[in-house]
Image: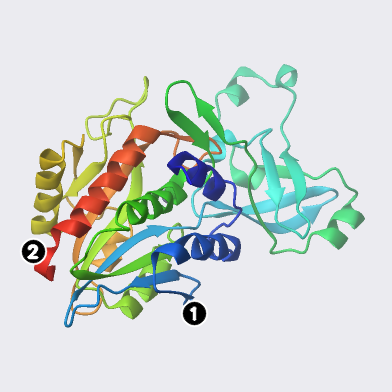
């Protein structure tokens, strides 16, 4: 399958943090051809194992998170649903957005908003707060209460699209695009002889505090880890110095959360293979699973590489396919470079 198609398929799965079953199931299926064994742990993390067959081989964990930001129904007021956040969806983008309420079968709703004609200037300039927003499911209160139990999760409903020259937009690219990259790198490694045992992890509950990675990494017991996530990309009105260029290639993390020797190796490999890359310098907490992976058990030598992503945590997260392809090649080169299993 083409990288773009995998990104699309994973983007279209509805699986907010704590409700990742559908994502875990499909990722397990997609992993199967590349690994010896796939299992799902007690947290819900997907773990794939691919042994290199060499005695005493080091263990390399490659991970991306498979949850997404979303909502949970906390109340029903007539036919309008009261919601709370799962993770940190961008509430500014919510009024009039379509939501998919994850009942079986799903129910759709539109987030209610005032007619633009009726609101004053002051109101116009204010970002809405979730406590003031309701999802209109077009039902009477009775019908909604019967069909939608409190505690039902919901996600953004959006349509995955290709934009212009080689960009794609959709929901949950953070971080299912990272999982698509891992699958693509596994396909590049298919005929390679490896010197490390690979553990692939699709981790859950990242968006609510890196929780799946804590348990999953403990169970995986790796020597090295490569965490694949997304990072902020520049746009015409967001040009911060520390934001990355969309199309500038994968962002290799540098800082205390990343083991220097691994960051250096990724940089050297990118140069050697002529893979476009950029450096993302972070002085402390990277806000990614790398943060908890590095301190698992007795410590894990950890690297972080990220895809530049525009409009993070909205229904239309946007990235450039060339960055995802470049990152897949870099991950594959990194795995091959661990000859003898040593740094
Ligand atoms: Zn996120």
Q: Helix, strand, or loop for circle 2? A: loop
Residue 324: quarter of image: top left
- Where is mark 2, residue-wise? 343
**Placement of 327 over or under 165, stated as above or below:** below
**Placement of 205 over or under 8, stated as above or below:** below
Task: Give the percent coordinates (x, y) of residue 40.
Answer: 49, 74
Residue 138: numbered disc: none
Residue farthest toward the front in the current orientation of the protein = 191
- Residue 288 in sight: yes
Task: Give the percent coordinates (x, y) of residue 335.
Answer: 21, 59
Task: Give the percent coordinates (x, y) of residue 266.
Answer: 15, 49
Dot 2, crowdedness within 10 Å: few (<14), some or many (≥20)?
Answer: few
Residue 125: quarter of image: top right
- Residue 257 in sight: no
In the image, taking residue 128 as reference, residue 289 lies left or right, namely left
Residue 42: numbered disc: 1
- Residue located at (35% from left, 26% from top): 238
Q: Are marks 1 and 2 in contact (CB under 8 Å)?
A: no
Q: Helix, strand, or loop for circle 1? A: loop
Give the quarter of the figure containing the C terminus.
Answer: bottom left
Q: CA distance from mark 1 to mark 2?
A: 32 Å
- Residue located at (25% from left, 53% from top): 332
- Residue located at (69% from left, 22% from top): 119
Task: Give the percent coordinates (x, y) of residue 333.
Answer: 20, 51
**Placement of 120 over or under 9, stated as above or below:** above
């Amino acid at each position: 399958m083409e990288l773009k198609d995998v990104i699309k398929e994973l983007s279209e799965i509805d699986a907010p943090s704590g409700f990742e079953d559908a994502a875990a199931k499909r990722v397990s299926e997609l992993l199967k051809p590349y690994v010896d064994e796939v299992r799902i742990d007690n947290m819900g993390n997907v773990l794939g194992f691919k042994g290199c067959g060499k005695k005493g081989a080091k263990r390399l964990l490659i991970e991306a998170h498979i949850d997404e930001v979303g909502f949970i129904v906390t109340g029903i007021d007539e036919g309008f649903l009261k919601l709370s956040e799962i993770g940190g969806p961008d509430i500014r983008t919510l009024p009039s957005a379509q939501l998919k309420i994850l009942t079986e079968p799903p129910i759709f709703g539109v987030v209610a908003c005032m007619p633009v004609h009726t609101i004053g200037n002051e109101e116009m300039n204010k970002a809405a707060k979730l406590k003031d927003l309701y999802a209109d499911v077009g039902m009477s209160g009775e019908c909604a209460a019967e069909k939608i139990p409190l505690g039902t999760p919901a996600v953004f409903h959006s349509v995955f699209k290709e934009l212009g020259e080689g960009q794609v937009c959709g929901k949950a690219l953070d971080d299912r695009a990272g999982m698509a990259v891992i699958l693509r790198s596994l396909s590049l490694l298919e005929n390679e002889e490896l010197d490390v045992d690979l553990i692939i992890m699709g981790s859950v509950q990242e968006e609510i505090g890196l929780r799946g990675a804590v348990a999953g990494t403990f169970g995986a017991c790796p020597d090295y880890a490569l965490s694949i996530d997304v990072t902020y990309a520049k746009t015409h009105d967001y040009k911060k110095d520390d934001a990355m260029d969309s199309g500038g290639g994968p962002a290799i993390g540098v800082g205390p959360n990343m083991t220097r020797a691994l960051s250096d190796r990724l940089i050297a490999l990118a140069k050697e293979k002529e893979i476009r890359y950029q450096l993302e310098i972070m002085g402390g907490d990277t806000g990614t699973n790398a943060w908890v992976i590095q301190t698992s058990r007795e410590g894990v030598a950890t690297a972080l590489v990220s895809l530049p992503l525009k409009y993070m945590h909205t229904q239309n997260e946007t990235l450039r396919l060339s960055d995802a392809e470049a990152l897949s090649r870099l991950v594959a080169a990194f795995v091959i470079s661990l000859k003898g299993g040593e740094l």
